[in-house]
Image (cartoon, grey):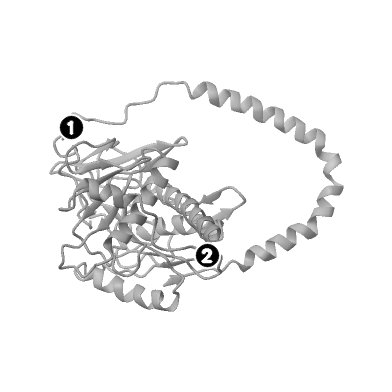
Amino acid sequence: MIRFKRKKPWRIIRWTVLLTLPIAAAGTAKFIPMMRSAAEKMCMSDTVKETSADAPKQSKTDNALKSDILSGEDVISHGYGVYAEINSTEVRLQSPLDMKSDNPGEKPYPENWSKGIKVMRTTYGEYSGTSYFDLDSCGQVNNKSDIPNDTLLKESRLPPDFTVSETDEPQVLIYHTHTTESFEPFVRDNMDAEFNYRTTDETKNMIMVGNAIQAELEAKGIGVIHVTEIHDYPSYNGSYGRSRESIVPILEQYPEIKVALDIHRDAIAGADFAAQPYTEIDGREAAQIMIISGCDDGTLNMPDYLKNFHFASSLQQQLEGDYPGLTRPILFDYRHYNQDLTTGSLLIEVGSHGNTLEQVQYSGQLIGRSLCRLLEELKSASKNLS
């Protein structure tokens, strides 16, 4: 299934607002006293919130537990395993816990839970080690290649190798090679012992996260195609080939697409625990995310891999600048992941299987917001050059 909405409905909304302005103006004087009263109550409410914000926060990490695994040197991605109310400033999404699928498929999300391994809530900070280096403004890169860090740092300073223009055509493609990857229902001490954290229910798998990204982009008028085909069920093997078959015709049909995001989740775990990497942003918990930018050792047929890295570096700094603590370092490694198809092709790990549905949905929204800002900056740069 492919979802793409053009921007024409916004023109209808604009004319509707213009036609109703005279009616609204006529009643304004009557409601001014009521508005003043409401404003006074809001100010009182804000004072209460500021006072409560000074309360001490509960510790988010258990650094003593499994510190050798969570140090960062040994934890890398394994590559596996909307209902929007939009106004001028905010996209409101229904909680995934409240969403009900009309067709949850052959592998529905569990309704009853058993007790399994421990969930370890943790927040990754800055990493140290010879493979890591800092980007200029913020964010880091985990360089697993033979390319020197200094060389990659210079490459990170180059802008993305595509331009963004004013168009009604889609410019972003969202898809999911491992569509059925799923998450915890809510914060708790133990995971489920019988659930393998994969489901065909689109309200509880990666499609839900893609929907959150899509909603933010469309709210800003950016055209998106969201491929919701399941590529990893019933067979996991060959899923990258199947996702490639899904997206190649779309890229051929819509040459204006500049960004292609394969949205996954990670699987960070040990023998007796699973990690829940999260951070707090604007009073809400968000799953920490990781961008993967593949490189070529001469065997992967990906000659333009550094162009993807340019985009990855720009997006990483935009995300971390907008929402400090949201990102883990970019993983730059010898991986293909269909990143030969555009110069804006990336894989993004949104949380891990220990994260909750609401944490990853919120992270999807944050990704969408930062991507909007980055694309707007690129659009402005293109205008200035023309």
Count numbered badges in the picture. Answer: 2
Q: For the C terminus, which image quadrant?
A: bottom right
- Answer left or right for 68 relative to 360: left
What secondary structure is marked by label 1? loop
- Answer left or right for 45 relative to 287: right
Residue 122 versus residue 127: which sits nearer the camera? 127
Q: Are marks 1 and 2 in contact (CB under 8 Å)?
A: no
Task: Give amino acid for label 2.
Answer: Ser
- Residue 263 x %, y %: 34, 58
Residue 383 versus residue 129: which sits nearer the camera? 383
- Residue 385 x %, y %: 52, 60
* Picture disc at residue 37: none
- Which residue is the site of mark 1? 65
Residue at the spot 44% in from the left edge and 65% down from the top edge: 102
- Residue 334 x %, y %: 18, 59
Instruction: Estimate how packed mark 2 is, as few (under 14), some (14 to 19) or many (20 or more) residues with alpha carbons within 10 Å.
Output: some
Residue at the spot 29% in from the left edge and 58% down from the top edge: 181
Task: Give amino acid for label 1.
Answer: Leu
- Residue 277 x %, y %: 29, 41
What secondary structure is marked by label 2? loop
Residue 200 sits in quarter: bottom left
Mark 1 or 2: in front is 2
Query: Is residue 32 placed above or below 233 in the rendered structure?
Result: above
Residue 183 can be seen in this image: no
Q: For the N terminus, which image quadrant?
A: bottom left
Residue at the spot 32% in from the left edge and 60% down from the top edge: 308
- Which residue is the site of mark 2? 165
